[in-house]
Image: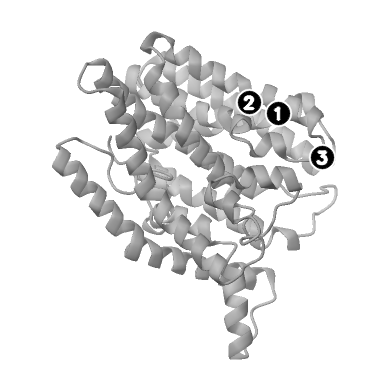
Amino acid sequence: MQYMKQLDSLRAFAVLGVLFHHYVAWMLKPVPPFKSYISTGGMGVDLFFVLSGFLISSILMKYKVELDGGDKKISHYLAKFYIRRTLRIFPIYYLTLIVALLLSIDNVRGYIMWHFFYATNFIIAHKDSWILPVGHFWSLAVEEQFYLLWPLVILLVPRKRLFPAIVLTMMVSPVFRIVCGIVHAKTQYGSIMVLGNMDLFASGAVLAYIRVYGDLQSQQTQTYFNICLIAGGFFCIGSLLLDSLGIGIGNSVGVFLRTFEGFFFSAIIFRASRGFKGIAGKCLEAKPLVYIGKISYGIYLYHLFVPLVLSWFATRLGVSLPGSMFGIFFVNTAGTILLASLSWHVIEKPISIFKDKMKASSNTKEEPVGLLLVE
């Protein structure tokens, strides 16, 4: 797989949207007639899921091509996939859990086994509470559950039935969200379970399927993603605008918002994977954005802990942290990027180099460092 630099910048926009939502969005006062602001955090996470669906599915489908060619057994590719994912996501995740546990940070010790087994989304649904500052672990749990399930779908489903299986998976999510809205009306259950997000992952998987088995240059492909861009963008912008105005669109329509977000984001990713040109291309290839995207996993993992750390240091040093919206965002964002950068260079990058050495020793061609959302 060729390294796609602009996808790193898309990850940067996604994680910066999350930081803005969690750090300062609560301080904003909507300007009439608007009654609320669009959740940049929710959209950022959804973009992450579509990106992950595309990149993970691309790798698995490459494995499937080799598997169908009779190269090796399915157990080889499953082991290969799970080992590489484990090396990428486990080290700093469990290190963060250990540090948070030792510091007795709220909602870590009491729910440690849920976090340990990547089941934070289940305990959030059960408690009907975001259990801050570890509430964002729900999306990491969804990612991990996706990693456990999706390789079996891609590698076990026959090639001729793979595309229908992906489409069927996409259709399951809104139905699941409708059912959950009826059964668990007072919770976020439908939106934080892996089945409630499979339409986002599957939107990325459709792009991966076309990339591996189809023709990205064909007129049919261009038409499909143009429709995704226009229809998805129109539905998403319209729904979010109505919601900001306080005009409810009802569960029967609202449950499809994330599905259309998947269409819209997959169209953006399609163009970024081929490379935007002009001003958009230069922006998406700007080194600061690319770098933030590269370390985005650490940024997302650490970002709700950083304000606690900064507050602790400020109290003991006798200094005051900024109280303005801009100051809060700047200080917390700078601290998070600094911590994530340190994590990348000291822990994550050496492990990635180790993975590359494993790749070289097995004499197989793998994805380059920094390609994946959560590799």
- From the image, tell me which residue sits under label 2: 173
Answer few, some or many: residues within 10 Å of disc 2's Cα (few below 14, many 20 plus, some between 14 and 19). Answer: many
Residue 281 shows in this picture: no
Disc 2 marks which amino acid? Answer: Ser
Residue 75 placement: quadrant: top left
Distance from the alpha carbon under mark 2 to that under mark 1: 6 Å
Q: Amino acid at mark 3?
A: Lys
Q: Residue 358's spot in the image, x, y percent?
A: 20, 45
What secondary structure is marked by label 3? Answer: loop
Q: To which residue does mark 3 refer?
A: 186
Q: CA distance from mark 3 to mark 1?
A: 13 Å
What amino acid is found at the position of numbered circle 1 in the picture?
Arg
Q: Is residue 3 visible?
A: yes
CB within 8 Å, label 2 to label 1: yes
The first of marks 3 and 2 along the sequence is 2
Q: Nearer the viewer, residue 41 or 310?
A: 310
Dot 3 alpha-carbon crowd within 10 angstroms: few under 14, some 14 to 19, many 20 or more: few
Q: Which mark is residue 323?
A: none
- For label 1, the crowd category at 10 Å Cα-Cα, with few meaning under 14, some 14 to 19 and many 20 or more, is many
Where residue 247 sits in the image (x, y, percent)? 85, 36
The residue tagged 1 is 177
Q: Which residue is rendered at x = 51% and y = 26% of the image?
A: 202
* Residue 363 shown left or right of residue 254 in the figure: left
Question: Nearer the viewer's eye, disc 3 or disc 2?
Answer: 3
